[in-house]
Image: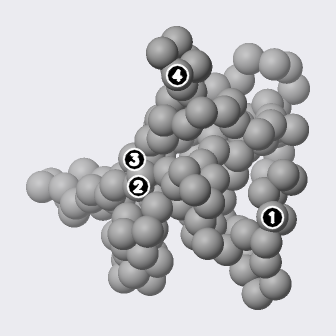
């Protein structure tokens, strides 16, 4: 993946996902032996990551949300993603500027939801859309 020069390019370049229980430590995020980040086959220019910070009685809450599109409904991708809907996830997202965000944690998993369809007309796109959201007590780990 070629990243773009500059510091104001939108969209997600790479989105990777892991189960919350697959980490041996989390500061920094280190996967346990036998676990890896799963790279999602997202459509170009289809992903977004949004941040909202709110002040509450218990301190700041960092809300990360967004979505991405995966081209072509297929059983292999569905079977993989359905497991994250049930268990939650930790996500490592690289934006088009090369900045990496890790959202979620073993004790604060990201909520994942899916919807998709074949479309009605021949020209409609057959795709799966994944949405994600988390309210967490700390900002995303970045690099």
Q: Nearer the viewer, mark 1 or mark 3?
A: 1
In three-dimensional space, the C-alpha distance between marks 1 and 3, rounded to whole angstroms, equals: 26 Å
Quarter occupied by the C terminus = top right
Question: Which residue shows up at 52% across the image and 12% down it?
Answer: 55
Q: What residue does disc 2 label? A: 112
From where the camera sits, is residue 106 visible? yes
Q: Along the polypeptide, which appears first: circle 3 or circle 2?
A: 2
Question: Which residue shows up at 43% across the image and 68% down it?
Answer: 87
- Residue 136, percent from left and from top: 55, 37
Q: Which quadrant of the view contains residue 35?
A: bottom right
In three-dimensional space, the C-alpha distance between marks 4 and 1, rounded to whole angstroms, equals: 26 Å
Q: Secondary structure at mark 1?
A: strand
**In this orientation, which residue lies closer to the viewer: 36 or 25?**
25
Q: Are marks 4 and 3 in contact (CB under 8 Å)?
A: no
Please identify the residue farthest to the front as the structure is shown.
57
In three-dimensional space, the C-alpha distance between marks 3 and 2, rounded to whole angstroms, equals: 6 Å
From this view, report whether residue 139 is shown above or below residue 134: above
Q: Along the polypeptide, which appears first: circle 1 or circle 2?
A: 1
- Residue 123, percent from left and from top: 25, 52
In three-dimensional space, the C-alpha distance between marks 1 and 2, rounded to whole angstroms, equals: 22 Å
The tag on residue 25 is: 1
Q: Please indicate whether residue 128 sits to the left or right of residue 70 in the image.
A: left
Task: Rate crowding at label 4 as few (under 14), some (14 to 19) or many (20 or more) other CA atoms within 10 Å.
Answer: few
Task: Rate crowding at label 2 as few (under 14), some (14 to 19) or many (20 or more) other CA atoms within 10 Å.
Answer: many
The tag on residue 131 is: 3
Q: Are marks 3 and 2 in contact (CB under 8 Å)?
A: yes
In three-dimensional space, the C-alpha distance between marks 4 and 3, rounded to whole angstroms, equals: 27 Å
Q: Nearer the viewer, mark 4 or mark 1?
A: 4
Q: Secondary structure at mark 4?
A: loop
Q: What residue does disc 4 label? A: 58
Q: Secondary structure at mark 2?
A: strand
Q: Nearer the viewer, mark 4 or mark 3?
A: 4
């Amino acid at each position: 993946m070629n990243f773009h020069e500059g510091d104001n390019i939108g969209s997600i370049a790479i989105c990777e996902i892991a189960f919350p229980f697959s980490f041996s430590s989390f500061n920094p995020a280190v996967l346990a032996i036998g676990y890896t980040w799963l790279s999602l086959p997202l459509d170009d220019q289809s992903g977004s990551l949004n941040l909202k910070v709110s002040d509450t009685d218990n301190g700041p809450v960092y809300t990360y949300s967004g979505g991405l599109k995966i081209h072509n409904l297929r059983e292999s991708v569905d079977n993989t993603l359905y497991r994250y809907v049930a268990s939650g996830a930790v996500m490592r997202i690289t934006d088009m500027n090369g900045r990496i965000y890790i959202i979620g944690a073993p004790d604060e998993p990201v909520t994942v939801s899916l919807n998709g369809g074949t479309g009605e007309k021949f020209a409609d796109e057959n795709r799966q859309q994944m949405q994600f959201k988390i309210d967490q007590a700390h900002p995303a780990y970045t690099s």
